[in-house]
Amino acid sequence: MSPMASLQDALGAAGRYGVRAGVRWSTSWWQVVQVGALVLVLAMSPSTYERDNRRALAHHIVVGTAPVIAWFAVLSALVSVVLIRIVIVTAASYGLGQYALEMVVRVLVLELIPLTAALFVALRVTVPSGAELSRMHARGDLARLQAHGVDPVRHELMPRVVAGIVAVALLAALSCLIALVLAYVSLYGLTLGAFAGFTRVIGQIFNPGVMLILALKTLLFALAASLIPVGALLRGPRPDITRTSAALDSLMRMFLAILLIEIGSLVGSYT
Amino acid sequence: MDTPPAATPPSPSAAPPPPPAASADATFSVRHVEAKASLLLLTLLLMVLGAVAYLAYARGAFESTQTLVLVSDDSEGVVVGMDLTFAGFPIGRVRRIELAPDGNARIVVDVPLKDAHWLRESSVFTLVRGVVGNTNIRAYSGVLTDPPLADGAVRSVLRGDTAAEIPKLLASARELLSNLTALTATDSALSGSLGNVQSATDRLKGPGGALGVLLGSEAEAKKLLATLARTNTLLERLDGLAAKADAQVFGKDGVMPHANASVQQLNALLADARASLKKADAVLDDAKTISGNAKTATADLGALRAQVEGSLRNVDALILEVNRKWPFARDTEVKLP
């Protein structure tokens, strides 16, 4: 009976560990939701926008967005050109050239670009920013700020989240514009003659439901990419967390959230 | 982007540590930061508003339209937002599809007013489903001088479904092929007919030829030939008969010269009759004159008679006078008893 007893002990330990892990997992997600709610409330209250906080917000927006705009525009233009060519040539080879524009817009503008923008902003801006915040928290910088009468949530947390949201929205809008222009030029060349037909096809694709889903998806992507990296902040100072492990943890959570949002949007769009 | 770790140096031993200033230093490291942030936010706002305005324009939100209702028994393949085309150009957009109480599908189409002149009262609308699954609604206006289509007009749409036509076509083709097989079978009517044609052509080449084929046997053909020969003889005799009749009628001693002479004599007679009539006319004129004279004479006779009557009355009065004066006058008095 001793092997059975040991098996039972092992199963019990595993169960207890699983329950503990599940509780930790749920708690951490709840913390993310709390941070999100907190930031949204702060972003909407006028008292947040006093001079110092306003400058901090402006600083994070500029520092988070401006350096990546050019890179992202070039990158997204290159990827768009390649994908547009592939779609156009494939459609034409099947004799379905008239559907190429619709396919390009649906694949690029509706699906790939918001996803790419969110991931790019997460990797380049919000995850490093969140890790830095965790480090500051671990070092006790935030506590010192609070001791000096500066609200660390308004001064450090909220600006980083808002900057991430703005960065995702701006990059997504910019690359959608670039993709549409490139699609037009690839299909029709440098002429304005086909603009009416192009506009008509765009109007047919973007019905109110699709517009709503695109806007909601981009907003949710932006929230996920901005909130999850700073969600670790509320777990309290954890000296064992290095910058790398915090970044990895945030990335894993964010990928999961983005995957769920993408699945939801696909279900909404194509069912 | 990252806040440099050097920005948060360990605080000196002085009482007020500088961490708040650390973040502030990082903030101040970018010049005109608020203006740049405003520019970025403004750009984002402009792009979002521009996108919304462009999509509204693309969906025809700024166009004034008129409504056209197309009625079809099946609206499969029709989706909201699809185009109504005229000569390949989109001139309208499906706004709504609904099921009418009579079971027909009502396809409500918005037609911009600037394109509405292509649609006329006599326009025809078709709903065509292609093999790939794409559906097209097309308008055809044959007479562009007809009155324009009114707002809210209801038209039935002609439906053509390529995918649905293929099974029908296959069924028809199968039926046709089975008929063809039945026709070309060895015991079929067509085969028998062809055999008969073969024997007929064989007989055509035979001694009786086409007559033999038509009349059934060679003997009948010979009879017909004999009949023809006799008919020919009869016609020759008829020819001679006709020549004789001609001589009798139109010859020198024929009927016609005599008739001609009679007609001439009749003409002379008629002339005489005309002269006699003229004479009778003159006699009548004379009689008319005589009767006029007699009328005048009768009038004179009236006056003469009046005179005679007056004379007689005078004579009568004279006699009465004489009688009165005469001694042998009669007693004229009436004596009463």
Image: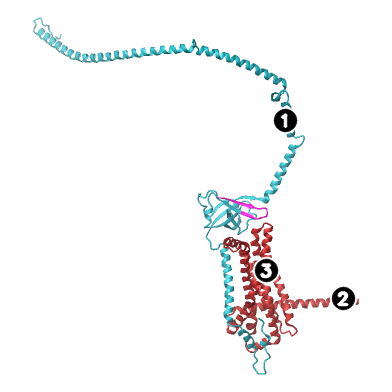
Q: Secondary structure at mark 3?
A: helix
Asked if one can make out residue A33 in the rendered structure from this viewpoint, the answer is: no
- Residue type, numbered disc 1: Val
Residue under pointer 3: A79
Magenta highlight range: B123-136
- Quadrant in the rendering for residue B274: top left
- Residue type, numbered disc 2: Leu
Cα distance in 3D space between marks 3 and 2: 54 Å
Nearer to me, A46 or B313? A46
Q: Could you classify mark 2 by the number of other residues whose Cα lies within 10 Å: few (under 14), some (14-19), or many (20 or more)?
A: few
Residue plotted at (61% across, 52% down):
B127
Chain letter belonging to callout 1: B
Chain letter belonging to callout 2: A
- B259 w.r.t. A69: above or below: above
Q: Which chain is cyan?
A: B
Q: Secondary structure at mark 2?
A: helix
Residue plotted at (65% across, 58% down):
A97
Residue under pointer 2: A7
Q: Which chain is red?
A: A
Instruction: Tell us which disc is closer to us: 3 or 2.
Output: 3
Residue under pointer 1: B197
